[in-house]
Image (spheres, rainbow, N blue to C red):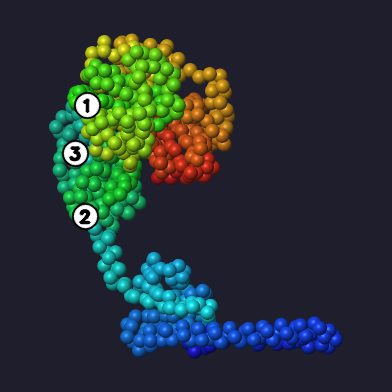
Amino acid sequence: MNKTLRRLIQPNMTAYFAVMALFCIAALVLQQYYLAAGEAVVTVLLFTAYRYYAVRRRRALAEYVQTSNEMLRRASDGEVPFPVALVQLNDGELVWYNKRFAELTQVRDTLNAQNISEVLPGLTTQWLSAGKTERPEELRYRDRRFRVTGSVLPTGEDKSGVVLGMIYLQDLTELLQVRDEYIRSRPMVAIVLVDNYDEVTNNLPDAVISNLNAEINTKINEWADRYGGLLRRLERNRFLLLLEAKDLASMAEEKFSLLESMRTVTNPAGIAATVSIGIGKDGVDFREDYNFAALSIEMALSRGGDQAVIKDRYDFTFFGGRNKTTERRTKVKSRVMASSLSELIVQSSRVFVMGHKMADLDAVGAAAGICCLCRKKGRRVSVVIDPEANAAEPLLALLRGMPEYADCFITGQEALLTADNKSLLIVVDTNRPDQVECKPLLESIRRVVVIDHHRRAADYIEQPVLNLHEPFASSASEMVTELLQYALEASDILTNEAAALLAGIVLDTKNFGVRTSSRTFEAAAFLRRIGADTVAVKKLFQNDLSSTVARYKIIQNARLYRQKIAIAALDYTATRTIAAQAADELLNISGIETSFVLYPQDTQTIISARSIGDANVQVILEPLGGGGNAATAGAQVKNKSVPDTLDELVKSIDRFFEQ
């Protein structure tokens, strides 16, 4: 310690002045008297200044060390029962340490300077230099775990140029082990639901159902026993599982193997059972964990089932949901929702209908169907839409030409000025608050109805008074068509309104090629019977020559990835309609099952994605903030360029196929 302090206080400058004196002598030998005189004057001045500042520095450092002398004495005398060290902050040099520090690290006094990071690997002084009083991470050393705190010693005026810091090591090994065990053993509540139980057991003899129940129970029990969980059956297809938090990592590592093993249970018709798992954690008690688990199950079912969802206090985490799911819908729900929606409309002073940003034919078509319902219920209705930024201008022009829609379309700001506390907002074709046409309107109206067919994302419109969410439906227009069949007479629907609804169905099904079910064709047949003109619908999808050329230019820029994926990354701005059409057109190329089109727009990158294969484009785009469904999805990646977004997209694709 004394050698170190002496080196700090009295740095050796003799060699420097000796060299300067040699220069003076050399000038005299060469008879350069003026040069020699000048060098002598400079040497004397520098030596005087050095002596002056050396004295000031020595006094300052002496005062510096004296202020910490009492602290060092106490630490040396054993009054501090844990390791303490004094270090130089600018380079981490070890200046002094107490007996307990020496016993811990086996450090010894040497002539060479020792760095704190050499004595205790991984320990630096950057956090102390940054003004923090505690190291953010714990220190692990020789199977022990330490909390590291410190303080900068007072210096008064910084005349010495040296800053010292005192570091304290508190051995909290046992306490941290108890804390870790507490975290690992925290209880979690899981709900396991056989989500297609009715479909698997429908119209089967009791003996066959009993055998299926036995197989299902065996699969779930074997999976729960692997983690030492407590399993209880609540209903015929619902189970409650209590387990500890330490088992969650193993479940995730095995990708929730129950999802895969349950598919081996099939009924005589070959229909495989699927299961959804909802897990709640980090609640203040079992009741809150159970509520989280119930929300997780609801989220899993709204996304198509056959997946695991984890809900903590802040967010959802998803596992699975990659496979194509079979339709599980009932017309009973549509009939009940039609009645409830009609009552809400009658009880409202005014109705607003709003879709997503850049509203397309499906959003506008569904809005037209709601307008028809409101008109027949005698309530004034307005469609909130951006007249400039939308992808449905031909349909809007068709509707504006009708007397019933003369003053129907308004902007979000106009809606905010006219809304009151009895207004009703109906959101169609989206369930995400950030994607609606006017978010302030959504936040200002108390009563909200959601009608959507996209798989639910982690951020969704919470607590709507009515929520018609059908992830198995082809489009929002199909859902609204079913509502109208139960709420109105066929003659109440205008021909152009029927055409608008049919156009929405045609758009989202890609001319009835994807995501169709028997109910999709039933809805289309109903619209055709009441006068929907297929030729007029066809004209709504026509493009001019320049748009067609632009679409094929995008296709020309596409590149293959993983043999079956086409990615077109543009360095110029395109319209969303053309980009979406290009993504659809790419799927017409033999061998391509998935397509992505990326293009810049202002400070963000827009992605349009389509799939007719095994790739679930919604799951792929979710990490990038996107949404949609398995066949059609999109994303808006803010504050990132196309190349950066492309890198993230490729990584997300790789993660999807590696799972």
N-term mark: 1 or 3: 3
- Name the amino acid type tagged 2: Val
At horizontal 42% and vertical 23% (from top left) the residue drawn is 392
Q: Eyeballing the image, is 456 above or below 582?
A: below
Q: Is residue 428 left or right of residue 543?
A: left
At horizontal 30% and vertical 44% (from top left) the residue drawn is 308
Which residue is tagged 3? Answer: 237
Q: Eyeballing the image, is 493 above or below 40?
A: above
Whether residue 453 is visible, yes or no, is: no
At horizontal 17% and vertical 50% (from top left) the residue drawn is 287
Mark 1 lies on a secondary structure that is: loop
Q: Is residue 145 left or right of residue 468?
A: right
Mark 3 lies on a secondary structure that is: loop
Q: Is residue 244 left or right of residue 411?
A: left
Task: Specify the quadrant of the image occupied by residue 400.
Answer: top left
N-term mark: 3 or 2: 3
Q: Residues within 10 Å of mark 1 (few under 14, many from 20)?
A: some
Kindly report the distance in space between the C-alpha atoms of the residues bearing marks 3 and 2.
28 Å
Decide which of 8, 155 is in the foreground and name it: 155
Kindly report the distance in space between the C-alpha atoms of the residues bearing marks 1 and 3.
39 Å
Decide which of 427, 255 is in the foreground and name it: 427
Tell me the mark number nearer the camera, choosing from 3 and 2: 2
Which residue is tagged 2? Answer: 284
Task: Specify the quadrant of the image occupied by residue 528.
Answer: top left
x and y percentages locating residue 84 in the rendered image: 39, 80
